[in-house]
Amino acid sequence: MTIEKALVVGTGLIGTSAALALRARGVEVWLSDIDEHAVTQARDLGAGWEWPGGEVDLAVIAVPPHLVGERLAELQKQGAARAYTDVASVKADPIADAERLGCDLISYVPGHPLAGRERSGPAAARAELFRGRAWALCPGPATGADALALVRELVSLCGAKVVTVGAAEHDAAVALVSHAPHVAASAVAASLTGGDDVALSLAGQGLRDVTRIAAGNPLLWQRILAGNALPVAEVLDRIAADLAAAAAALRSGEQAEVTDLLRRGVDGQARIS
Amino acid sequence: MTIEKALVVGTGLIGTSAALALRARGVEVWLSDIDEHAVTQARDLGAGWEWPGGEVDLAVIAVPPHLVGERLAELQKQGAARAYTDVASVKADPIADAERLGCDLISYVPGHPLAGRERSGPAAARAELFRGRAWALCPGPATGADALALVRELVSLCGAKVVTVGAAEHDAAVALVSHAPHVAASAVAASLTGGDDVALSLAGQGLRDVTRIAAGNPLLWQRILAGNALPVAEVLDRIAADLAAAAAALRSGEQAEVTDLLRRGVDGQARIS
């Protein structure tokens, strides 16, 4: 039960990074993408070779969330691999798509590496992208032990740590720790568009840190958010309510309410530091 | 017109860091704080020696914003220095206090180094804290050229870059680039207090960056925000409105509105990157 041959479908940032990590560990890696230029770029970076077809041990489906089910169905019809996983940052929708399309759920282990960069595309890929990071796996009741073992090996070869979690729980969790924070960073960054040059010359490292992730690809993020809309909306409503209440408290001089928010912020930050 | 002797009043993070920077450039530095322990700590770090009284070239008043005017009046009554500056992160209120208390405005140059850390107190101080950072100066119509030259020399000795700006413009600017982003980071961090351990185990570098500054001292920040309440409230209202609108758009499936916010975020982030 070992990954000797892998197929990476979708050679963007995440797919190419996984391919590079596997290559670095001696795995034979094949590449596929609807964009031929992306495959060529990934190949030239040493991520593997254009896939001519044929069976591999594990297929890593690294396409946007709304395309995962479709691509899984195609690959399974071709008998491309013994096991399949994806890397989409939402899990309930792709799993529902796979079920609807009649995919084999025994050989499919839904996954999501918690790693990324503001830049996208194969040129931004790095073999070390996943090192030390969490990699969520959401096996369902039908998931086979062999497939799960192969996907756990993928995570290990990439230097990441498996976090096993249900799909709905995963989506609520990433709404809280990734998707809503991204929108909040975007809203802070968006407020800067109204500032003049002198104001922005006073920006320090704190603001740069808060807004760094807001540089991410808007279309990619719009799709991620649309695929996890309700959990994200719930968190955003809480953050928006806290900020509106803080603004009102500042206007009316109710210092205690502002201090309470700042204290809750210290407590929340301490949970991830 | 050179700083040979300086006095630092208030040996917290900023005061002690300025003292260390001046010491590293050969300036004779004297220290004062209402907390004797803080002075001893700063002295033991090599920041200077307990001030026995007597005149210096420049006094740096590094106390909380609401105490700047009072401390300036006392020091001027003692004839402590040829020129005075402060480092408070708001400027309109301290200047109004100084006017109200009848301070000499010729020898006072209001200032604000855009640098900080999440930790406070002299033990967190570093001589390099200001290196490459902006340092706002808000001279008024009464400010004397000699005082301004001495304070510009202070900024230069600390390795920072002078940004000259009016006090009201400064306060609106820091509301935008520092104070409101701090509250937004606090609100995102506060939302994490409701997350379970599995959810928080999925937190990545992005969330850590967004929430890093939320670890700052709540009482210190409450005072900063109270001293700049209206400009901060205005920015917070805009951010809260953007987040509430994004939540509503996600619920109703209006993708274009979400994409628009993400795009504005990319534009705003680009202005400080």
Image (cartoon, coloured by chain):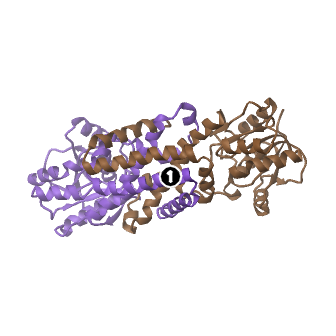
Chain colours: A brown, B purple
Out of B255 and A259, give the one closest to the viewer.
Answer: B255
What residue is shown at x 48% (from left), y 38% (from top)?
Answer: B192
What residue is shown at x 39% (from left), y 48% (from top)?
Answer: A243
- Seen as rendered, the residue at the extreme front is B252
- Seen as rendered, the residue at the extreme right is A54
Locate residue A80 relative to residue A136 in the image: left or right: right
| Mark 1 chain | B
What residue is shown at x 12% (from left), y 55% (from top)?
Answer: B76
Out of A197 and A59, give the one closest to the viewer.
Answer: A59
Query: Counting other residues with Cα less than 10 Å from the Cα at mark 1, is it few (<14), some (14-19), or many (20 or more)?
Result: many
Locate residue B56 relative to residue B200 in the image: left or right: left
What residue is shown at x 43% (from left), y 62% (from top)?
Answer: A192
Locate residue A228 relative to residue A37 in the image: left or right: left
Local SS, label 1:
helix
- In the rendered image, residue A156, in percent from the top left (x then y), is placed at 72, 36
**Residue A29 appears in view:** no
The residue pinned by badge 1 equals B248
What kind of residue is marked 1? Ala
